[in-house]
């Protein structure tokens, strides 16, 4: 057998990609997962292959300086069987005109683009290129996950749900990860190629791509553009000129395509859920199981003392005195892998955060850090355990600054790290994973964790002044309505108390940036007998809060109770999420792949004023071809009336898909909805 005997060859892309669960990327090129065999066919011109007489060897190479010791080059000959610990090959066909060769990659090979060469006694022929990905189905791969349903969710699912809103009102938002859409895998590989570590030393970086810990850290750094040619530029408040408002994104596809097509110029603009969603898309595309996490009341501890110092004025309104903050919610990702660099017991979910907050080893990135290490208070573990621990466990110290410049401690029960959420496997329900990050509040295990983390302030008993203050909400918290909120003050002491009670409301962004006034009440003399209570209402009118609201539909309520007898001060803070109207999506006809389908979409105007410039936007993985379909209304919509459109699209693949819909207008913005659609063959 010689090269003159080989008439042609076939990399069997359709068969291999389907077998390796990469066929949704297309079947025009070979895309395989490491540690799993793939088949190539050599068409012989004459004669038959004789294992005893003919030598048949292969060379695979990746990167600019392929080396065997770097895991970027391998040379191996056909043998009697596959060795699943390294690159190997065997003939699987009986004697005949077609020679079928099964090639298995090493389960720890570097991911990326490879060339495949046939070598016979120094005579070489290039058989083509292929892409090698991580393989969570392979027990020898460090991202192996032994749960088929979880793999469908965390690797193969092209859409999902990200939680927003508030810890009292978790708001699901559907997202199109689109990791298998056209151009996306190439964009992900380009992210690896333009990262600064690769630019500095390509060979070293290429070799390091054997390790999902390294790759995840690169992704965390490269999704933001703060130190490099990263994907997204962050902006957390107006103006958004020259870019897209973060709330308008519903898909990673357009972001990654734009970044690639515009020569790796940062896409404007992202906020935490956008950063996390794009990181999830990239991780899944490369074969790392990944999910988006939402942490409610998420602390940003800048000075690493595990305490958030929060300053307020004499009205209970926040003042920006430190860089510490508490975000209404914050999103990051978890990726599944082993941690051979840590003591045993810390494999599994690893948290990483692509939102640029603090530098890690001189770069704006965070993680991956073992979620189990966070729960156990192991703050010395790589990477950035202390920062993530503070996000879910920091103490809150509230300080009032008085007009004369003096300060006063304020009693304010604020617990960070609440209702940590992610989408459930195989359903659209929310899974609460708070228990994976922390022990129950007040438990012995929590106490031991805080001791280990030297989180001594959390172990101290906070002062009880005998006054309780809570905020209660009325009904119909819908955007466009007037509604009531209440401050409930209670005296738990045996003495009469005369107090001042303030109840203020301000618009607020999810990241804690305070906006305009929405209503205010100041009662100078509130008498509370022993065991007595007082309920104070505040009416929030649409015409007052409408222009103050940010894109997040959040109003911050702050109630302040000051005891005249001793100056004791109690603060209660609560956020209100205003409901947008429901988007109704009706599918017309029988959904089938490659057949045009129509959706009828309606939104009722809940506002007491007309809305105009109405625009519907649709997208969905394998539904709209990776693009956004836009329909505009030319007419205004009166209060109580419906905006309605009919939109056509052609599904490209069968299965359960999410159709994502956005509605925007001049006065009613960022209304989001989705519907699951089962596409038949």
Image (tube, grey):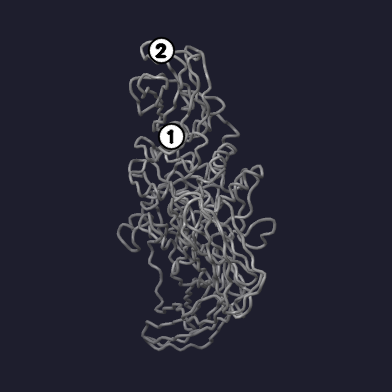
Q: Which mark is residue 513?
A: none
Seen at 53% across and 50% down, the residue is: 278
Q: Which of the 4 image quarters holds residue 553?
A: bottom right
Seen at 39% across and 41% down, the residue is: 136
Whether residue 598 is visible, yes or no, is yes
Instruction: Give the structural element (helix, strand or loop) at label 2.
Output: loop
| Residue nearer the viewer, 367 or 320 | 367
Place of residue 133 in the rendered image (x, y in percent of width and height, measured from the top left) = 46, 37
- Above or below residue 202? Residue 377 is below
Place of residue 325 in the rendered image (x, y in percent of width and height, measured from the top left) = 53, 61
Ranked by sequence position, the earlier of labels 2 and 1 is: 1
Quarter of the rendering occupied by the N terminus: top left
Seen at 44% across and 82% down, the residue is: 489
Q: Which of the 4 image quarters holds residue 169?
A: bottom left
Place of residue 258 in the rendered image (x, y in percent of width and height, measured from the top left) = 63, 48
| Left or right: 643, with 102 as reference point | right
Q: Residues within 10 Å of mark 2 (few under 14, many from 20)?
A: some
- Above or below residue 130? Residue 369 is below
- Above or below residue 429? Residue 361 is above
| Residue nearer the viewer, 608 or 443 | 608
Reading the image, the residue beneath label 2 is: 54
Reading the image, the residue beneath label 1 is: 16
Whether residue 408 is visible, yes or no, is no
Instruction: Give the structural element (helix, strand or loop) at label 1.
Output: helix
- Above or below residue 73? Residue 617 is below
Whether pointer 2 and pointer 1 mark residues with C-beta atoms closer than 8 Å, the reply is no
How far apart are the two marked residues, 2 and 1, measured between alpha carbons?
26 Å
């Amino acid at each position: 057998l010689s090269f003159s005997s080989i008439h042609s060859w076939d990399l069997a892309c359709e068969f291999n990609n389907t077998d390796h669960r990469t066929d949704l990327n297309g079947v025009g090129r070979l895309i395989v997962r490491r540690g799993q065999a793939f088949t190539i066919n050599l068409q012989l011109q004459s004669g038959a292959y004789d294992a005893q007489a003919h030598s048949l060897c292969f060379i695979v190479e990746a990167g600019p300086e392929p080396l065997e010791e770097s895991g970027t080059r391998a040379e191996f000959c056909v043998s009697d069987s596959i060795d699943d610990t390294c690159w190997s090959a065997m003939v699987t066909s009986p004697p005949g005109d077609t020679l079928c060769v099964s090639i298995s990659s090493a389960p720890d090979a570097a991911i990326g683009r490879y060339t495949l060469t046939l070598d016979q006694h120094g005579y070489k022929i290039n058989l083509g290129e292929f892409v090698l990905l991580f393989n969570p189905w392979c027990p020898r791969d460090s991202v192996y996950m032994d749960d088929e349903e979880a793999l469908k969710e965390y690797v193969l699912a092209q859409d999902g749900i990200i939680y927003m809103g508030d810890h009292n009102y978790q708001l699901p938002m559907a997202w199109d990860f689109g990791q298998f859409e056209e151009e996306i895998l190439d964009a992900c590989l380009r992210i690896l190629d333009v990262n600064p570590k690769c630019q500095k030393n390509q060979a070293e970086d290429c070799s390091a791509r054997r390790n999902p810990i390294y790759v995840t850290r690169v992704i965390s750094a490269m999704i933001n553009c703060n130190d490099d040619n990263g994907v997204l530029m962050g902006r957390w408040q107006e103006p958004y000129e020259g870019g897209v408002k973060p709330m308008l994104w519903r898909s990673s596809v357009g972001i990654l395509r734009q970044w690639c097509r515009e020569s790796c110029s940062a896409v404007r603009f992202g906020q935490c859920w956008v950063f996390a969603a794009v990181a999830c898309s990239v991780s899944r595309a490369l074969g790392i199981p990944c999910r988006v996490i939402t942490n409610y009341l998420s602390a940003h501890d800048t000075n690493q003392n595990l305490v958030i110092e929060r300053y307020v004025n004499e009205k209970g309104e926040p003042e920006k005195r430190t860089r510490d903050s508490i975000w209404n919610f914050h999103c990051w990702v978890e990726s599944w892998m082993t941690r051979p660099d840590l003591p045993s017991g810390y494999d599994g979910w690893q948290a990483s955060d692509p939102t640029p907050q603090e530098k890690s080893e001189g770069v704006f990135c965070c993680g991956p850090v073992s979620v189990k290490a966070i729960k156990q208070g192991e703050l010395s573990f790589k990477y950035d355990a202390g920062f993530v621990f503070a996000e879910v466990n920091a103490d809150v110290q509230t300080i009032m600054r008085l007009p004369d410049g003096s300060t006063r401690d304020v009693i304010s029960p604020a617990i960070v790290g609440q209702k940590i959420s992610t989408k459930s496997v195989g359903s659209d329900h929310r899974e609460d994973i708070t228990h994976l990050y922390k022990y129950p509040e007040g438990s012995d295990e929590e106490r031991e964790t805080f001791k280990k983390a030297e989180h001594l302030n959390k172990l101290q008993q906070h002062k009880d002044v005998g006054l309780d203050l809570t905020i209660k909400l009325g009904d119909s918290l819908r955007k466009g309505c007037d509604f009531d909120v209440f401050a409930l003050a209670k005296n738990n002491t045996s003495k009469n108390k005369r107090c001042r009670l303030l109840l203020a409301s301000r618009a607020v962004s999810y990241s804690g940036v305070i906006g305009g006034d929405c209503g205010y009440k100041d009662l100078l003399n509130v008498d509370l007998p022993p065991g007595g209570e007082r309920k104070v209402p505040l009416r929030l009118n649409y015409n007052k809060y409408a222009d103050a609201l940010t894109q997040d539909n959040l109003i911050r309520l702050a109630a302040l109770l000051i005891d005249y007898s001793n100056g004791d001060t109690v603060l209660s803070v609560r956020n209100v999420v205003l409901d947008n109207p429901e988007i109704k999506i009706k599918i017309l006809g029988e959904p089938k792949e490659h057949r045009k389908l129509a959706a009828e979409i309606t939104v009722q105007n809940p506002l007491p004023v007309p809305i105009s410039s109405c625009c519907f936007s649709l997208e969905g993985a394998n539904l709209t071809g990776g693009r956004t379909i836009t329909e505009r209304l030319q007419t205004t919509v009166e209060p109580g009336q419906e905006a309605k459109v009919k939109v056509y699209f052609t599904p490209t693949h069968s299965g359960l898909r999410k159709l994502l819909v956005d509605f925007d207008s001049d006065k009613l913005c960022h209304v989001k909805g989705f519907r699951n659609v089962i596409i038949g063959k």
